[in-house]
């Protein structure tokens, strides 16, 4: 019965087949992990800042925009916020990748 494999061994074999690139990744150093955490925190703060500014603009819309234009302006602001957020997230991932490859 020595030919039988444990569930762990079978799982490891399957994971190697599903994602071989993960096996080739080098281990991150403590410094790299810390740097990546700092990058993520920095970008989370930037995104939160943009969100606060966005919410402020939405809140002030009734004071600054004619009633019949509010929905269109709100939709445009939401689109701009999503674009900014996506751009910041992509920038963050590039920086994280750079840090991983040091």
Image: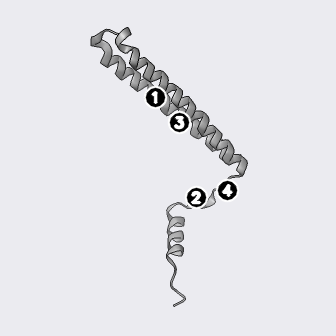
Question: Which label number is shown at residue 35?
Answer: none
Position of residue 69 relative to residue 23, above or below, is above
Real-space Cα distance between discs 4 and 1?
33 Å
The residue where tag 1 is placed is 83
Disc nearer the start of the sequence (2/3):
2
- Residue 76: quadrant of the picture: top left
Residue 27 tag number? 4
What is the x, y in percent for residue 8?
A: 53, 73
Cα distance, mark 4 to mark 2? 10 Å
- Point out the tag, 4 or 1, that comes first from the N-terminus: 4
**Residue picked out by circle 3:** 89
Q: How is the image coloured?
A: one colour
- How far across and down, in percent of the image, does residue 65 sit? 35, 10
Instruction: Give yes or no for contact between labels 4 and 1 (Cβ–Cβ under 8 Å).
Output: no
Q: Is residue 35 above or below residue 85?
A: below
Which residue sits furthest bottom? 1
Q: Closer to the N terminus: mark 2 or mark 1?
A: 2
**Tag 2's secondary structure?**
helix
- Estimate the spatial distance between the alpha carbons at disc 4 and disc 3, rounded to whole Å: 23 Å
Instruction: Tell me which residue sits at (61%, 34%) in the image.
Output: 42
Q: Taking 66 as reference, is 6 left or right?
A: right
Pointer 2 residue: 22
Real-space CA distance between mark 1 and mark 3, rounded to the nearest whole angstrom = 10 Å
Crowd rating for badge 2 (residues with CA inside 10 Å; few <14, some 14–19, many 20+): few
Q: Nearer the viewer, residue 13 or 46?
A: 46
Of mark 1 and mark 3, the one earlier in the sequence is 1
Q: Residue at x 52, y 30 (%)?
A: 48
């Amino acid at each position: 019965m020595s030919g039988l494999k444990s569930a762990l061994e079978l799982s490891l074999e399957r994971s190697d087949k599903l994602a071989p690139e993960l096996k080739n990744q080098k281990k991150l150093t403590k410094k790299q992990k810390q740097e990546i955490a700092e990058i993520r925190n920095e970008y989370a703060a930037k995104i939160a800042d943009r969100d606060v500014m966005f919410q402020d603009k939405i809140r002030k819309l009734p004071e600054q925009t004619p009633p019949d234009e509010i929905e269109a302006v709100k939709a445009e602001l939401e689109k701009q916020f999503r674009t900014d957020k996506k751009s910041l997230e992509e920038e963050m991932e590039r920086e994280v990748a750079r840090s991983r490859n040091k």
